[in-house]
Amino acid sequence: MVKKAKSNNFYCNSLKAVFQGICMLIFFLNISHAVQAHEGHKKKIKLFTEKIKKEPLNPENYYLRGVQYQSHGDFEEAKTDLLKVLALEPHHMHVDYNLALLYFEQNLLKIAMTHAQNYIKKSPENYEAYHLKGHILNKNNKYRMAADAYKQAIKKSKNPSIELYYALSENYKDAGNLEKATQSLVKGMEEIGSLIPMQKSIIKLEIAKENWVKAHALIDNIIARVNRKETWYVYKAEVFKLQKKNEEAKKYFIMAHKTIEQLSPNLRRKNSIKNLEVKIASNIN
């Protein structure tokens, strides 16, 4: 028995040593990658700088160097180069977008909007311009106008992303129009698919409208389709609690508890399940 214990200790220590070695290797690989990225950045800056010396009136070289500076977080250098592009070529197709993004990141919203509008004039069919315009208006607390910009971005995009529909919904919500906020997500699901995160956002909006019947119907629809039901039982219970229907809430907390008891030991050890169990216990004991 002693020999076996020593063997187990040796095995555990060996695994620990291997694990530590792997962690150190990953650490040094990450450092190496960061160093390589920085070296690559310096080489590109040097290359574009040499091209600028040879062709000081070519706006594209300033643009490429400016974009490289911008991607590396060197905003002042990026701004200098991008403004130089505008001085040399006022009708440059993309530089206003980069400048709008740069000023937006510095929270200079008025000048950011000026460049976003200029980019829209130059490229009126590009959805990215309206997307950025929506971000700028949102940051300026102009939610209704931001929603209009996101609507345009969705209209112009060939494949609107889930982010655009979320942004449209959030801005309608912040503007106080919960119905349009809901409709935006419903439209998104029609285009992209019935994604559960979007359904959950619709449920939250129905709760905000105190449309309890609709909220419960949506939750029931999800429960009927998913394999893992414990989280949704708890969510339904919490909605009943908001309605001050404590008996119904307790019923669903118990259902969640029974469902968790049927999970494998490995699943029950997960923090998410442990947290659910704590929440359930506080509501049924």
Image (cartoon, rainbow, N blue to C red):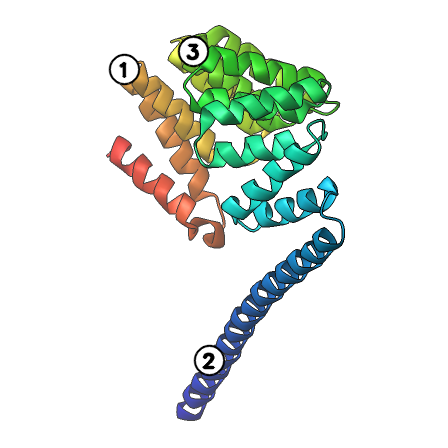
Residue 128 falls in image quadrant: top right
- What's the mark number on residue 145? none
Q: Rounded to the nearest whole Å, what is the CA distance between mark 1 and mark 2?
A: 53 Å
Residue ID at (68%, 17%): 121
Asked if residue 216 shows in the view, the reply is no
2 or 3: tag closer to the N-terminus:
2
- In this view, the residue in front, 207 or 182, is 182
Residue ID at (28%, 19%): 246
- What's the mark number on residue 175? 3
Relative to 51, 264 lies left or right:
left
Q: Rounded to the nearest whole Å, what is the CA distance between mark 1 and mark 3?
A: 28 Å
User: Type of residue at label 3?
Assistant: Ala
Residue ID at (45%, 9%): 178
Q: In the rendered image, which residue does mark 1 sit on?
A: 244
- In this view, the residue in front, 144 or 161, is 144
Judged from this view, the residue extending furthest toward the bottom is 3
Instruction: Answer few, some or many: residues within 10 Å of disc 2's Cα (few below 14, many 20 plus, some between 14 and 19).
Output: few
Q: Quadrant of the C terminus?
A: top left
Instruction: Answer few, some or many: residues within 10 Å of disc 3's Cα (few below 14, many 20 plus, some between 14 and 19).
Output: some
Instruction: Answer few, some or many: residues within 10 Å of disc 1's Cα (few below 14, many 20 plus, some between 14 and 19).
Output: few
Give residue 135's position: percent from left, percent from top.
Answer: 52, 25
Asked if residue 100 shows in the view, the reply is yes
Q: In the rendered image, which residue does mark 2 sit on?
A: 12
Q: Are marks 2 and 3 in contact (CB under 8 Å)?
A: no
The answer to whether residue 119 is above or below residue 282 is above
Q: Quadrant of the N terminus?
A: bottom left
Foreground mark, 2 or 3? 3
User: Type of residue at label 2?
Assistant: Cys
The secondary element bearing badge 1 is classed as loop
Give residue 107's position: percent from left, percent from top.
Answer: 43, 32
Give residue 258's position: percent from left, percent from top.
Answer: 41, 37
